[in-house]
Image (cartoon, rainbow, N blue to C red):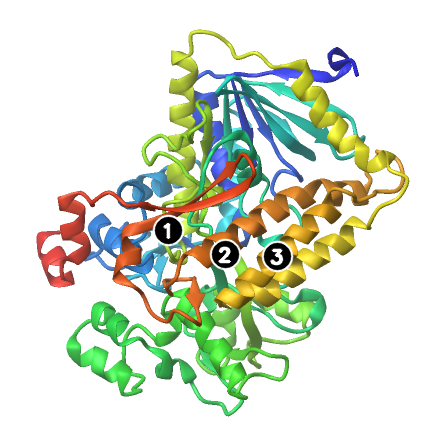
């Protein structure tokens, strides 16, 4: 084929993904005068940032003045079971307040305290009310603000364009090949730096809060280009997704419902979370030993309710109730805020949840409980990056947001995702600008490499026959749902990995009927390799980590093993397939280790 006939555009920096992280990165690069392309697989505004409804975590101290970046850092490290990258968690806690105030300056309309400050609410795993919020539409307000501010910075937006593969010039990044979803025509992006901000890969599971776009594209493309993946075994199941009706199963129910007073009940009308408080968690997070004892004794007087334990604990607790026969009619639990708050309060503080259940499930949450259950929600793992620059092992390739690993360790605290996007989106953008400025020459793209990408894509349309790509996707989802779920075992994980080897053969032979113009079957087929790389990386990393830590639970290795706290698991592409190994973690900086281990009294006194 004649590559010169393909649409080709040149920019200094290419940002792939237009959620909060991608937008913040593009703002940073465009503000510094770099020609920037922002590519979105779907439409601008349709990103998972919108689904982060409860709030943005930052130690502003507006509701409780005792809060500080040190306590936020401490909470994040403890929530991540000390597997977080220390420097990333430090940068996040230190810079989040500035990023939130910056967003306010750009026009974000936050809820207010009586003194006119940005209001903050309680959330799971956070010591103090820390989540800056806009009702239960915080992510939507963030996206609106970033888009409104960003369009004035001068970047070029390419919507409904799927990136198929990254291009390299030797070891360094050179751009990417994309596909216009509407016309089926190809486009070549030439760029000296690429920032991946593509989110996670939740569509590899059947029950997920993720929409169709989230097929692990960034992680898979980085893997194919020679970057490493890390912490892929840690996949977060949000404890409260919609359960009924089936058409909406998995849609997120914000943690803000519990933060504003909602409680979890089983089918015996028992508030069961008091039965699942880990001894260590209670002693570490309660105000005092007396309060910890009240929690463990089942009293309801504690200021921070057990419904706001970390997400891994709550998700496993709901699953345990269901397995014990105490679940809701459709396999979950009841989330009740109607008995705790007045109807006007619920409609004012949780407008999206009120309308979501009213319209989709015909449930009035001001009167009746919601039926909820765990749903695959978020990837703590992703592309391995340098903490300060967000650069991968591939020169010129950066990653930020959910597709990057390191910030959240073994389990993400609610609300940390939105501040993560802001902090590391900016850092990735700044580092990409620095990389371009330091480059002595523009990278070159190879016609043969571009032609191979195009040929691999069009082969799917030109085959005489082959399996339906939608059925193959269902097979991937069924394998992950059944064998790589909330709890795992050696036997299940090995079964999943063996099944994936069979699915690779099917993926290589899928057939999409029809023309190239907005062909949904073709688009589904093009997503399958990314889904399968992501799924296999999760399963193989989960098999190697022989312990239970955070969001990764092994039935055959219960509890945390001290020796495994010294290792991260890294996935890379080998000559004959996927390679998985554990790498030793460097010792933490003495100052940060002291903060993480300090008592709250010490930190509050010093703060």
- Label 1, on which residue? 408
| 125 shown above or below 4 | below
The mark closer to the camera, 1 or 2, is: 1
Q: Secondary structure at mark 1?
A: loop
Specify the label residue 535 is tagged with.
Answer: none
Residue hosting label 2: 53
Of labels 3 and 1, the one closer to you:
3
Q: Secondary structure at mark 2?
A: loop
Q: CA gap, disc 3 to disc 2?
A: 38 Å
Taking the image as shown, residue 105 lies to the left or right of residue 167, namely: left
| Mark 3 surroundings within 10 Å by alpha-carbon count, few (fewer than 14), some (14 through 19), many (20 or more) | few
Depth order, front residue of 147/268: 268
User: Between marks 1 and 2, how big is the CA–CA gap?
Assistant: 19 Å
In the drawing, does residue 282 fall left or right of residue 38? left
Callout 3–callout 1 Cβ contact below 8 Å: no
Query: Residue 425, percent across and down?
Result: 43, 35
């Amino acid at each position: 084929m004649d590559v010169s006939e393909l649409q080709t555009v040149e920019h200094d920096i290419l940002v792939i993904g237009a959620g909060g992280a991608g937008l913040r990165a593009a703002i940073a690069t465009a503000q510094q005068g770099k020609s920037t392309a922002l590519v979105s697989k779907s439409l601008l505004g349709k990103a998972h940032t919108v689904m982060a409804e409860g709030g943005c975590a930052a130690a502003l101290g507006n509701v409780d003045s005792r809060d500080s970046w040190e306590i936020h850092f401490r909470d994040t490290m403890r929530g991540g079971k000390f597997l977080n990258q220390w420097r990333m968690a430090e940068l996040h806690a230190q810079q989040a307040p500035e990023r939130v105030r910056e967003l306010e300056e750009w026009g974000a309309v936050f809820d207010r305290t009586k003194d006119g400050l940005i209001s903050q609410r309680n959330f799971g795993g956070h010591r103090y009310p820390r989540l800056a919020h806009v009702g239960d539409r915080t992510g939507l307000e963030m996206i609106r603000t970033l888009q409104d501010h960003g369009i004035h910075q001068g970047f070029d937006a390419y919507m409904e364009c799927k990136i198929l593969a990254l291009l390299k010039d030797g070891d360094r990044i050179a751009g990417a090949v994309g596909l216009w979803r509407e016309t089926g025509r190809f486009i070549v992006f030439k760029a000296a730096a690429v920032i991946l901000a593509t989110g996670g890969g939740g569509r590899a599971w059947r029950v997920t809060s993720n929409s169709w776009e989230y097929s692990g594209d960034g992680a898979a493309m980085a893997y194919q280009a020679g970057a490493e993946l890390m912490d892929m075994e840690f996949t977060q199941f949000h404890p409260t997704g919609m359960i009924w009706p089936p058409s909406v199963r998995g849609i997120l129910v914000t943690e803000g419902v519990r933060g504003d007073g909602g409680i979890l009940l089983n089918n015996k009308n028992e508030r069961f979370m008091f039965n699942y408080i880990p001894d260590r968690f209670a002693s570490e997070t309660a105000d005092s030993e007396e309060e910890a004892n009240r929690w463990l004794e089942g009293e309801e007087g504690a200021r921070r309710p057990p419904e706001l334990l970390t997400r891994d604990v709550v998700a496993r607790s709901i699953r345990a109730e269901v397995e014990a026969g105490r679940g809701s009619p459709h396999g979950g639990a009841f989330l009740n805020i109607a008995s705790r708050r007045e109807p006007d309060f619920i409609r004012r503080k949780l407008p999206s949840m009120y309308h979501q259940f009213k319209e989709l499930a015909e449930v009035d949450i001001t009167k009746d409980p919601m039926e909820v259950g765990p749903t695959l929600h978020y990837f703590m793992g992703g592309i391995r990056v340098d903490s300060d620059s967000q650069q991968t092992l591939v020169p010129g390739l950066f990653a930020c947001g959910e597709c990057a690993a390191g910030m959240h360790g073994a389990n993400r605290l609610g609300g940390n995702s939105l501040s993560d996007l802001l902090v590391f989106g900016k850092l990735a953008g700044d580092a990409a600008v620095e990389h371009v400025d330091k480059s002595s020459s523009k990278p070159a793209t190879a016609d043969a490499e571009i032609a191979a990408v195009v040929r691999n894509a069009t082969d799917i349309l030109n085959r005489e026959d082959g399996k339906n790509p939608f059925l193959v996707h269902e097979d991937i989802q069924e394998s992950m749902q059944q064998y790589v779920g909330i709890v795992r075992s050696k036997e299940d994980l090995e079964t999943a990995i063996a099944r994936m080897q069979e699915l690779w053969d099917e993926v290589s032979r899928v057939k999409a009927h029809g023309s190239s113009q907005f062909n949904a079957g073709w688009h589904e087929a093009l997503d399958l390799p990314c889904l399968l790389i992501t799924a296999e990386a999760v399963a193989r990393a989960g098999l190697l980590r022989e312990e239970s830590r955070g969001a990764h639970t092994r039935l055959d290795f219960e509890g945390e093993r001290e020796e495994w706290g010294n290792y991260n698991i890294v996935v890379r592409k080998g000559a004959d397939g996927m390679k998985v190994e554990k790498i030793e973690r460097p010792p933490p900086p003495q100052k940060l280790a002291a903060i993480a281990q300090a008592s709250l009294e010490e930190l509050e006194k010093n703060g």
